[in-house]
Amino acid sequence: MSLLVSTGKTGEEDDENHDETLTASQRERHDHMWSTIGLCGSAFSMFYFIMNVFPYSGFFALHLLNNENSSDGDGPRFTAATIGPYAGTMAAAFRLGRVGTAVPWGKCADVYGRKFVLVVGCASNAICGLMFAFATSFRVAVAARCIAGLLCGTMVAARTAVSEIPKGNSELEKKGIALLSTMSGYGKLITTLYSR
C-alpha cells in the first residue's frame, strides 16, 4: 500500500510553477549580467582614459610646448631631458581633478541616482578626451584632463551599483565586484599593448 500526499495541484501546475521559478532566476541572472557588463564598460573606459596618456605624455608635452614657444618667438626650447615635470603634470591632471570630487559625486549619486553619475562620467571622458586629442597648447591639454577628472564619478557610482544590483544575492555580488575590480588591470593591459 502506498501513501500519497496531495498538494492540491496537478502535475501540470507544478511544472508551470517550476518553470516560472527558473525563468525568474534566469531573468535575474540575465539582468545582472547586462548591468554588470555596462558598469564594467564604464569603469574600463575610465581606467583606459587615465592610463592611455602615459606612453606618449612626454612626446605630446614636448610637441605642444615647443610649438607654443616657436610661435612666440625665441622662447626656451624643451628637450627630452627637461620635459619630465610637464609630462608628469599632464599625466597626473586627471587624478588631481578627481581628488576633491569623489565625495561630492557620491552624494550626487545618492540624490540623483547612479545612472546619472555614470552617464556624466562617461560623457565627460568622451568630450574631454576629444579636447585633449585636439589640444593645440599644453594648458588646454592639462585643463581637458583635469576637467575630465572633476566630472568623473564613475567608480564611486559603479562600486555602489555593482553591490546593489544583485539585491542580496551574495554570489552575484561577489562576481560583479570581482569583474569591476579587474577593469583596472584590463585598462592598464590594453594601454600597454596599444603603445607598442
Image: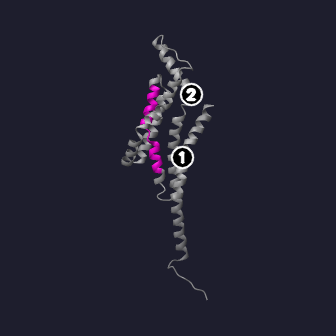
Residue 70 at x, y percent in the picture: 49, 14
Q: Secondary structure at mark 1?
A: helix
Query: Which numbered disc flags the more N-terminal residue, 2 or 1?
Result: 2
Looking at the rendered structure, the kind of residue marked 2 is Tyr
Q: Nearer the viewer, residue 102 or 11?
A: 102
Residue 171 at x, y percent in the picture: 54, 58
Q: Nearer the viewer, residue 194 or 15?
A: 194
Q: Considering only vertical position in the picture, is 99 above or below 72?
A: below
Residue 185 at x, y percent in the picture: 57, 42
Q: Main secondary structure of the magenta part?
A: helix
For this orientation, the residue located farthest to the left is 111
Separation of disc 2 and disc 1 at Cα?
A: 26 Å
Screen quadrant of the N terminus:
bottom right
Neighbourhood count class around disc 2 (C-alpha, 10 Å): few under 14, some 14–19, many 20 upward? few
Read off the magenta span: 140-161
Neighbourhood count class around disc 1 (C-alpha, 10 Å): few under 14, some 14–19, many 20 upward? some
Hey, which quadrant is residue 146 in on the image?
A: top left
Q: Nearer the viewer, residue 86 or 61?
A: 86
Tag shown at residue 56: 2
Q: Considering only vertical position in the picture, is 87 above or below 8?
A: above
Q: On the image, numbered disc 1 is attached to which residue?
A: 181
Magenta span has 66? Answer: no
Screen quadrant of the C terminus:
top right
